[in-house]
Amino acid sequence: DGGKQAGWVSHITSCCPLPAPSSPLPPACRTPLEEDFVWRVFTQVTVALKECHRHKDASGKVTPILHRDIKPGNVFLD
């Protein structure tokens, strides 16, 4: 869900069918991540943050996007 009001855009997630990121994973899901996967995710998050900081509005004016509470639990993987 999301919305836009007075120049602000928001995105709100109301439901996540997976266990909460802060809850312990079941034993079958506790496999280590491949290093190349970790670097790919890290790179994508870094590029996304850079783009948020360089965001331009329709007139071309730099208007950085506010980001809050960036942590591993708030990075959704598909």
Image: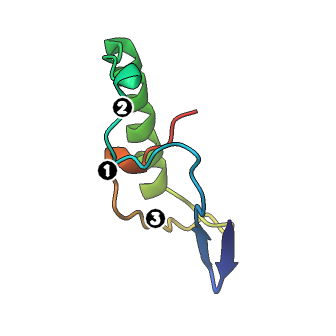
Tell me the element at label 1: loop
Question: As displayed, is residue 6 above or below residue 58?
Answer: below
Three-letter amino acid code at disc 2? Answer: Phe
Q: CA distance from mark 1 to mark 3?
A: 19 Å
The one of 59 and 47 positioned closer to us in this rendering:
47
Q: Quadrant of the C terminus?
A: top right
Mark 2 vs mark 1, foreground winner is 1
The one of 67 and 1 positioned closer to us in this rendering:
1
For the residues bearing labels 2 and 1, Cβ distance under 8 angstroms: no
| Residue highlighted by disc 3 | 64
Three-letter amino acid code at disc 3? Answer: Pro
Q: Which mark is residue 38?
A: none
Q: Which mark is residue 42?
A: 2
The one of 32 and 78 positioned closer to us in this rendering:
32
| Residue highlighted by disc 1 | 71
Colouring: rainbow
Tell me the element at label 3: loop
On the image, which quarter does residue 8 sit in? bottom right
Question: As displayed, is residue 18 above or below residue 14?
Answer: above
Labels 2 and 1: the sequence-earlier one = 2
